[in-house]
Image (cartoon, grey):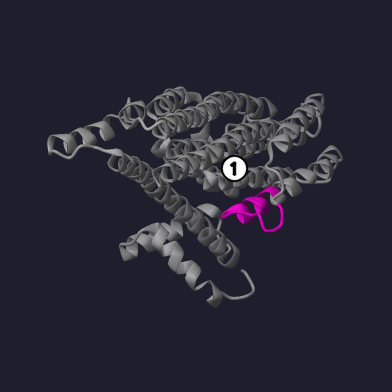
């Protein structure tokens, strides 16, 4: 019966390797999404200056930005997972497929959006909102890929990376709002309030990134933030509506260039996170393949009737399990065939359970985040709040009731049916 046990252990390893290889494809898709989002942010920025300058600036750059977006889109499409066959869909596939459909629909709207921008048929705010919606769908697709992560280290890197990407996207929106305000010579109350909200939202996303990123990535981000003195000065001007009389196209370009430099530096760190993600996927695959190779050698040795060498083949380098079996020897229990195969099963079971526990905790955190986002959207739709107002409302309710924001969001969603059918 023992070779059958080894066969099933090997099958467990093979399934794990297959999942990790799929996760590597997810990592490659995430890197491609990162580049596409960055190119869309660059096109949105160029379109923003084009509209704010009434077509006087960046006209030659727009076709280049469009070309770069098309190239990045091709890379994303090549890395999308294959369509699941009927009856073959696994858990979590429905959400992922829905996110892919939404992202592809957003990309299909770009040609019409560009045409309207070239013809000045959209206001600056509407054009930026349309670009931002496409980017938001791509980010949602990225967050959906986290559900497929079967390795905690890879899952942590995915959460850190997409939290960072979301913060960078908010920085892009801040660049657009600031460019419009400086170009017009004055910030409206709404623009200043939106700047404040965008800065606060970036801080929340960066906090999420810092929670899941490794020490090296956090240190690099902190060094980057320390270089933002000029940006902070212009932010204060915008948020307090203290724009000098000299504001205009030149000041708008200065703000745009400073923010573009910051976003480009963020992108370099984002690229390293993407490389780290791919590297961690490859390392996990290598560890799983080495463990499976050890099982294959063990199975062959068992087939040859040589249990002691078989044990040394598998246990070499596995300190915890080796110490456990030595402890059994000191108690007078010689680790015969059945005993050390049972040890292998227990080791695999403990390792998989530890992974499941860590992934479950991480997914619970992400689900709380989704609940908060849905609760904010509910308040925005029915109370006429801005996103920041909705967030502050949730925070106030949580403080007043001495509860977590996530708990308040969940309670709000549970009674969503009582909200009036006609939004404010």
Residue position marked by numbered label 1 in the rendering? 142
Range covered by the magenta-colored residues:
85-100
Q: Nearer the viewer, residue 97 or 56?
A: 97
Is residue 52 visible from the viewing direction of this image? no
Residue shown at 85% from the left, 40% from the top? 115
Q: Which residue lies most toward the front here? A: 305
> Going by the image, does 399 lie left or right of 335?
right
Name the image quarter holding the C terminus.
bottom right
In the rendered image, residue 78, in percent from the top left (x then y), is placed at 73, 35
Residue shown at 65% from the left, 32% from the top? 32
In the rendered image, residue 288, in percent from the top left (x then y), is placed at 46, 33
Residue shown at 33% from the left, 32% from the top? 307
Q: Quadrant of residue 54?
A: top right
Is residue 227 visible from the viewing direction of this image? yes
Give yes or no for residue 112 being in the magenta stretch.
no
Q: Nearer the viewer, residue 394 or 231?
A: 394
Q: Quadrant of residue 169?
A: top right
């Amino acid at each position: 019966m023992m070779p059958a046990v080894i066969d099933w252990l090997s099958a467990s390893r093979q399934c794990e390797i297959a999942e990790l290889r799929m996760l590597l494809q997810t990592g490659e898709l995430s890197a491609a999404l990162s580049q596409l989002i960055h190119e869309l942010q660059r096109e949105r920025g160029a379109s923003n200056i084009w509209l704010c300058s009434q077509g006087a600036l960046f006209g030659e750059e727009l076709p280049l930005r469009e070309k770069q977006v098309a190239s990045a889109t091709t890379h994303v499409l090549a890395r999308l997972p294959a369509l699941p066959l009927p009856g073959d869909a696994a858990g979590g596939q429905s959400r992922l497929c829905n996110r892919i459909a939404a992202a592809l629909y957003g990309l299909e709207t770009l040609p019409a959006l560009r045409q309207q921008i070239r013809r000045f048929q959209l206001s600056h705010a509407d054009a930026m909102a349309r670009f931002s919606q496409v980017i938001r769908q791509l980010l949602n697709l990225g967050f959906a890929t986290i559900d497929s992560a079967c390795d905690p280290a890879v899952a942590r890197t995915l959460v850190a990376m997409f939290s960072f990407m979301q913060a960078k996207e908010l920085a892009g929106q801040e660049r657009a709002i600031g460019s419009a305000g400086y170009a017009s010579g004055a910030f409206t109350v709404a623009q200043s309030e939106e700047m404040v909200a965008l800065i606060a939202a970036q801080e929340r996303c960066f906090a999420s990134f810092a929670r899941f990123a490794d020490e090296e990535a956090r240190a690099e981000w902190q060094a980057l933030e320390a270089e933002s003195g000029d940006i902070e000065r212009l932010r204060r001007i915008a948020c307090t509506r203290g724009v000098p009389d000299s504001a205009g196209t030149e000041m708008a370009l200065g703000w745009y260039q400073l923010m573009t430099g910051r976003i480009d530096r963020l992108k370099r760190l984002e690229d390293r996170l993407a490389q780290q993600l791919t590297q961690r996927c490859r390392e996990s695959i290598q560890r799983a393949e080495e463990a499976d190779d050890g099982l294959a050698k063990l199975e062959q040795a068992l087939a040859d009737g040589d249990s002691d060498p078989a044990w040394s083949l598998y246990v070499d380098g596995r300190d915890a399990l080796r110490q456990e079996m030595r402890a059994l020897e000191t108690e007078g229990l010689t680790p015969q065939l059945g005993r050390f195969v049972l040890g292998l099963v227990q080791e695999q079971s403990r390792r998989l359970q530890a992974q499941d526990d860590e992934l479950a905790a991480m997914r619970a955190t992400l689900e709380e985040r989704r609940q908060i986002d849905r609760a904010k959207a509910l308040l925005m739709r029915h109370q006429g709040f801005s996103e920041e107002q909705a967030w502050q409302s949730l925070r106030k309710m949580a403080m007043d009731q001495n509860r977590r924001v996530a708990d308040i969001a969940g309670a709000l969603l549970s009674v969503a049916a009582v909200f009036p059918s006609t939004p404010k």
